[in-house]
Image: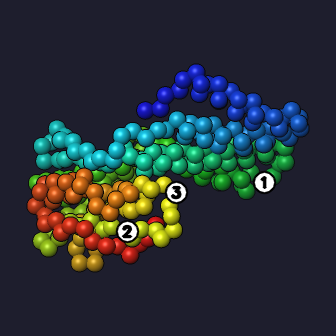
Amino acid sequence: MLQFNTAFLFKATAICAAGCLPISLNRESGFVWTAFLLPVSLAWLVATQVGKHGQFEFTFKQTLDSSVVEFDTINGRYDQWFTRGRIITSGGCLSVAIGFPILHIVDPGPIALWLPIVVLFALGAVLLISYTERRKVLTVKRQFVTDYLLFGRLCWLRRRWQVRDGDYLAVYLSAPNPVKIAIPEFQFCHILFVCRSQRRFMIASMFTSDPVVPDMEIAARRIAKLVDLPYEGYRESHATW
């Protein structure tokens, strides 16, 4: 949960003052630079408020329907940096969506040329902020479901995987990057798949500094038990990070 205290307000005031400097330097067109700089700068400031909350963990939630179990991955360094990236990228999209109309005032151009860009980046900012996923296991139907949500509401078709005989669960582990990684927690990528021949359906993923994570093993075995699937442990992936 983001907390906006007095120190944050002072920083936001300083950023707004710095973003308005182009106006004082050039009264005619300086506000164009301000329009581009302020959204992404404030988004960067908000992103710095996103902290690391505990260690990575799986969560399982029993819904009102006893045959439906929701699960998710929360906390950890990856969750922190992923949230920061979404906020900063959405700020960049807002900079484009606000900046182009302001630029049009100073340097008029065909509206059909820049309006589609503005609409596209505005939608991108909304999607980045509001988009979430909800993963479920339908135990009776033996089915995995991923819901894509906007502002907590289903926005388009779900992804489904119907379990069949011969399917199995496995965790694919990426090879470590030979180059030293600045963030040790991102050295290995663990991805839990339900597999069928050459096809795979991703269930969950995580980044860690360890090649084997007990929490992933525990969650994989629990999910396997929910849909009566064999769990075949870790496998090596050819992807490197």
- Callout 1: 10 Å neighbours few (<14), some, many (20+)? few
- Residue 105 spot, x, y in % from top left: 81, 42
In the orientation shown, which residue stands out farthest toward the front?
A: 180
Q: How many marks overall?
A: 3
**Coloration mode:** rainbow
Instruction: State how far apart marks 1 and 2 are (Cα).
Output: 49 Å
Give above or below for 221 relative to 105: below
- Residue 9 spot, x, y in % from top left: 61, 25
Instruction: State how far apart marks 3 and 1 are (Cα).
Output: 45 Å
Nearest to the observer: residue 93 or residue 79: 79
User: Measuring 13% from the left and 66% from the top, which residue is drawn there?
Assistant: 230
Which sits earlier in the primary sequence, circle 1 or circle 2?
Answer: 1
User: Which disc number belongs to residue 1?
Assistant: none
User: Measuring 51% from the left and 64% from the top, which residue is drawn there?
Assistant: 180
Whether residue 127 can be seen here: no
Q: What element carries label 2?
A: strand
Q: What residue type is labelled 1?
A: Pro
Q: Name the residue under label 3.
A: 182
